Image (cartoon, grey):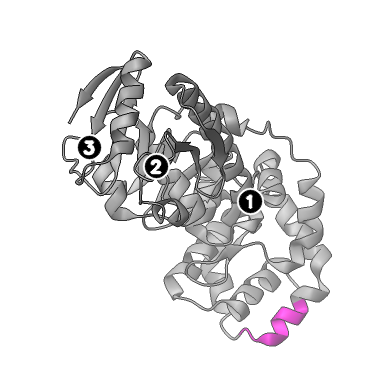
């Protein structure tokens, strides 16, 4: 049997979506022959799935013969095939340096639609994928170096962290940075679109990207803590995702509490449950729309500090302001 017909009938048998999506696949793969194969595969059934499974070698050779850019095929096989939603795969291939790559994958038959959203390699190509993956050569981006470039962009890093941890407080983000972006790109590390969600480079896992981001954040938090020269116990908490400085100035409740040192905002629920006697220190400039809240906030930029007092008087906050003056910061009290 013609391998193209086996392939066409297989897809018609497994596809569960709109005809327009399926026709597009046929047009990409078969060119001028697509209508002939469309008519010949109209009565496809479960038996055609079994036929494809019995003819894997034939189908592998068919697809191999179409591939005219082996490096891209190898990158997909090694890294991209874990992304099965078409829109996610498009962004993933962009992060691998292959924008527009999904159309080629569909044209080769290395990927096909199983419904209107899912585009993946058919199971009969398993051996080919293993073979191609072994040929993949790609210089992995250094996550810390890529993220360091954005470490002064608090809005970007706070939103990326929120997406990675699935802990986004929209109201807090809006208060500190403005409306959340509809699109976000962070170098070769991650892309976000509100109609797709977050996609990180297929070379790394979400946990690996988050770990690198927190390493960058920890370094910056440590530098801030050192500049403040606060007494007491300091640690960087991966649970709160900020540096925490525990203070007990004179043993009194009024001057005891936590200074949360956050180069960019953390939306960790554990952090925001500590609102009692907490002072938040954030890198960056105070947003003009910022209103006073239950806790004091200090915005630090270079040698300048904008200290926004909490809604109710706080001796702990007063102490932090005194420390800022003594550490040589140019302080604006608001």
Horizontal and vertical percent for residue 205? 63, 49
Q: CA distance from mark 1 to mark 3?
A: 49 Å
Label number found at residue 201: none
How many numbered marks have been drawn onto this rendered protein structure? Answer: 3
Q: Residues within 10 Å of mark 2 (few under 14, many from 20)?
A: few
For the stretch drawn in magenta, the main secondary structure is: helix
Locate the C terminus by quadrant: top left
State the SS at label 2. Answer: loop
Locate the N terminus by quadrant: bottom right
Query: Measuring 67% from the left and 34% from the top, which residue is drawn there?
Result: 140
Query: Front-most of 159 and 113?
Result: 159
Q: Which residues are magenta?
A: 44-51
Query: Which residue is tagged 3?
Result: 309
Kindly give the residue lying farthest to the top in the view shown: 328
Say whether marks 1 and 2 touch (CB < 8 Å): no
State the SS at label 3. Answer: loop
Query: Measuring 41% from the left and 52% from the top, which residue is drawn there?
Result: 274
Label number found at residue 252: 2
Query: Which residue is tagged 1?
Result: 80
Query: Front-most of 2 and 145?
Result: 145
Query: For residue 323, what is the image quadrant?
Result: top left
Query: Measuring 66% from the left and 43% from the top, which residue is drawn there?
Result: 68
Query: For residue 30, what is the image quadrant?
Result: bottom right
Q: Is residue 95 magenta?
A: no
State the SS at label 1. Answer: helix
Reply above or below: 49 against 220: below
Say whether marks 1 and 3 touch (CB < 8 Å): no
Q: CA distance from mark 2 to mark 3?
A: 20 Å
Q: Is residue 49 magenta?
A: yes
Query: Measuring 59% from the left and 40% from the top, which residue is drawn there?
Result: 96
């Amino acid at each position: 049997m013609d391998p193209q017909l086996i392939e066409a009938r297989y897809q018609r048998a497994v596809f569960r979506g709109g005809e327009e999506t399926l026709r597009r696949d046929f047009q990409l793969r078969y060119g001028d022959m697509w209508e002939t194969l469309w008519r010949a595969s109209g009565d496809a059934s479960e038996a055609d799935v079994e036929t494809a499974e019995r003819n894997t070698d034939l189908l592998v050779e068919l697809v191999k013969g179409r591939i005219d850019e082996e490096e891209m095929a190898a990158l997909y096989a090694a890294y991209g095939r874990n992304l099965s939603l078409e829109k996610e795969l498009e962004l993933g291939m962009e992060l691998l340096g292959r924008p527009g790559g999904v159309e080629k994958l569909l044209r080769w038959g290395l990927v096909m639609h199983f419904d209107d959203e899912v585009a993946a390699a058919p199971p009969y190509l398993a051996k080919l994928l293993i073979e191609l993956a072994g040929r993949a050569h790609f210089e992995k981006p250094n996550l810390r170096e890529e993220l360091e470039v954005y470490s002064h962009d608090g809005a970007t890093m706070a939103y990326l962290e929120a997406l990675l941890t699935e802990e986004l407080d929209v109201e807090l983000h809006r208060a500190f940075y403005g409306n959340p972006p509809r699109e976000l790109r962070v170098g070769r590390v991650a892309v976000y679109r509100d109609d797709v969600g977050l996609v990180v480079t297929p070379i790394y896992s979400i946990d690996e990207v988050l770990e690198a981001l927190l390493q960058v954040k920890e370094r910056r938090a440590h530098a801030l803590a050192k500049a403040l020269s606060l007494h007491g116990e300091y640690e960087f908490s991966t649970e709160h995702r900020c540096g925490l400085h525990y203070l007990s100035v004179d043993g009194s409740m009024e001057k005891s509490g936590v200074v949360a040192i956050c180069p960019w905002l953390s939306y960790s629920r554990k952090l925001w449950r500590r609102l009692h006697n907490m002072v938040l220190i954030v890198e960056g400039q105070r947003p003009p729309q910022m209103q006073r809240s239950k806790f004091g906030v200090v915005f630090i930029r270079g040698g300048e500090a904008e200290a926004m007092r909490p809604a109710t008087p706080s001796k702990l906050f007063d102490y932090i302001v005194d420390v800022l003056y003594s550490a040589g910061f140019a302080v604006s009290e608001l």
